[in-house]
Image (tube, rainbow, N blue to C red):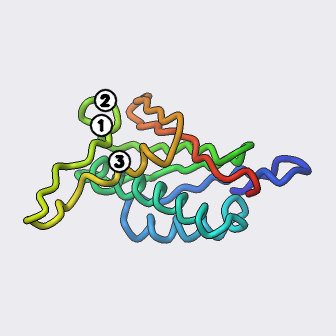
Amino acid sequence: MVKSDGGNKRQTVQVKIAGDPNAVRDGLACLLAGPALRNLDAEARGTVQIVLAEVLNNIVEHAYSNASGEISIRLNQQAGGIHVVIIDQGAAFPQKEPPSGTLPQIDAMTELPEGGFGWFLIRNLVRDLAYRRIAACNHLSFFLPLPTDQ
């Protein structure tokens, strides 16, 4: 569903996708081609894609690791960026809050670790990150700041 904010260029986009890797890939492609994101410059689109891919893939890998379900995504263009709300019915975060985003220790003599970079990227690219567990649902919201000429 796409809703327009009257006569100005702000858009609200809502999509629901299945909590699986193929649906995440297709959903990201749909969002990036949609009215809220298609006119962003390459750098802004890249930032949005990184953040959304990291969040959605974490939901599939962790929240839905032992179950299946839907992911609801709402993007709302605002002055200076995009407000994002993502809701799923998967498992809650272990400490009832998103990971801190601390980079893993890296030894130059060994291979890079498999994980640990996603939440670092997310926390460094967004503002106002908030998480709530409401009625067996995870509600994650954040603001993606974008250049003012977007």
Q: Is residue 25 above or below residue 36?
A: below
The location of residue 53, given as percent across then percent down, is: 44, 60
Residue appearing at x 40%, y 56% in the figure? 54
The location of residue 119, given as percent across then percent down, is: 35, 47
Q: Earlier in the sequence, mark 3 or mark 1?
A: 1
Left or right of 21 in this view: 82: right
Q: Residues within 10 Å of mark 2 (few under 14, many from 20)?
A: few
Question: Label 2 amino acid?
Answer: Lys
Q: Earlier in the sequence, mark 2 or mark 3?
A: 2
Residue topped by disc 1: 93
Question: Label 1 amino acid?
Answer: Phe
Q: Nearer the viewer, mark 3 or mark 1?
A: 3
SS type, badge 2:
loop
Q: Which residue is more in the foreground, 103 or 50?
A: 103
Residue appearing at x 34%, y 56% in the figure? 60
The location of residue 20, given as percent across then percent down, is: 37, 63
